[in-house]
Structure formats: C-alpha cells, structure tokens
Amino acid sequence: MPFAGGVAHHRRVTIRTTPAGKPSPVRRQIGATVAARLEANPAVRKAKVDAAQMYQHPDFLDARQCAAMIRLIDANKRPSTLLTPSADPNFRTSESCDMDRWSPDVQPIDESIAALLGIDPAQGETMQGQRYAPGQQFRAHHDYFHENEGYWAKMVESGGQRTWTAMIFLNDVEEGGATWFPLAGIRVRPKRGLLLAWNNMNPDGSPNTNTLHEGMPVGAGVKYIITKWFREGFWLRD
C-alpha cells in the first residue's frame, strides 16, 4: 500500500521491531497516553467513530498562521511522492512542501502540535504541507508503515513505526477535497484552522487497517493542509 513519506534529517535509534500486524506495548502506551490527554482537553472533540481513535480541534490555527503556511507551501511546492511506487499514475497528484521546523513561522506550530498530543517533538517527522488544485487527489492509503515491506529496515533506523497523525486544514475549499475514512465511516470537510488527529494503531498497538483514508479530489478552489507524523521512537537527529 503506497503512502506519503516525510523527508528530512534523522538520527539512528534502536527500535525493538514487532511482526506486521502484531501488538506492541510501546505503541499501546503511546496511544493510551495521547488519547487520555486529548480527551481531557475541553477544546478537543472526539469523533463519533468506533473503528479508530480520532479527534478534532476547531480553530487550532488562526487566520494569520494559516496564511503564513499557505505562502510557504506555494513558494516551496514540488510534486508529491510515494515511498512505495504505485502503478496508478493518478494515485497521488498533489504538490508537497517540507517545512523547515526551525523557521520562525513553522516552529511555534510544529511544537504546539506536539504539545497538544503530549508527544516529544523529537518523535515528530518534518511537518509537510500539501496543495491540491482542482482534480488533484490522494487515493486511499495508510499512514503507518507496512512492516513486511522492504523499506521497513530503514524506517526502524529513523524512529520506527508511525503512531499518530495530525492534519490541519489551512483553508475552506469551495467544492470537494474532504478527507475520507471509508472503513471508519467518517468524512471530514476542509475548514480553516481545523486540526484532525488520529491514532494509526489499534488500542493494543497493532496497525489499525480502519485508518485507511483518502484525500478526495478537489472540485473547485485549492485545498491546503499541513500534516505532522509521529514515530514510536526518536526521529529527530541530535
């Protein structure tokens, strides 16, 4: 299953691997700790789904912050890529931008996402911006790594499995562009400033196949989002 991959520097760490689909005590603890923190936050709403741990924080970013992120994406966009190639040339047709986590516009947002979830910022990959013009999309995929794939050894060296994803919509979209979880049964429409967070693992720490999601085609307007992925171990280089 193809999926997006962050690109930036990282340091080697030791991760105890588990077979694909097996429970993990480390990931189970991360999932439980983050979920408890989010549920204790009065600004956060738990999504009405049973198939995945999913939460929304309206107005997490203000209009000024969203505009700054949009400018960065427009100035630094490149064709989006996949870690695992797909035979479908239209699988992921958006444009992406790898954010400089230490820049004055990015760092406060980057660190505020980690603080919201209660995860060490060093476990977070480089925040990525995405731009979807009319007709562009990202077909159904998982954010977690498939541990039986050839790339898994490299992922172990750079922090191991992805646990939580945090996505922020930077603008309202005239038509289309929803993030759709077909197995979990929820569709989230773009809304400026809205943060959507979900655990890519089951409560026992095994990968949750129900987190399959799709960036639906934009019908009119341009969709902008930023995405932050977190690992089970340390991703950031010292």
Image: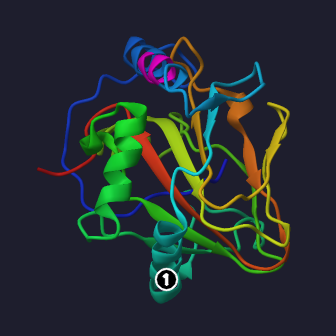
Q: Is residue 17 left or right of residue 165?
A: left
Residue 75 rendering spot, x and y as whole percentages: 46, 88
Left or right of 144, for residue 104? left
Regarding mark 1 in the picture, which secondary structure is present there?
helix
Residue drawn at x 53%, y 85% is 74
Question: Is residue 205 depicted above or below 143 in this figure?
Answer: above
Question: Which secondary structure class fits the magenta region best?
Answer: helix
Q: Residues within 10 Å of mark 1 (few under 14, many from 20)?
A: few
Q: Residue furthest left?
A: 238
Asked if one can make out residue 76 in the rendered structure from this viewpoint, the answer is: yes
The colouring scheme, among rainbow, by chain, secondary structure or one colour, is rainbow
Q: Which residue occupies 69% across, 35% down?
A: 211
Q: Which residues are magenta?
A: 33-37
Q: Position of residue 202 (x, y in %)?
A: 60, 19
Rendering coords of residue 141 (x, y %):
70, 48
178 part of magenta stretch: no
Of the pair 110 and 62, the residue shown nearer to us: 62
Residue shown at 50%/34% (left/top)?
A: 147
Residue of label 1: 71
Amino acid tagged 1: Arg
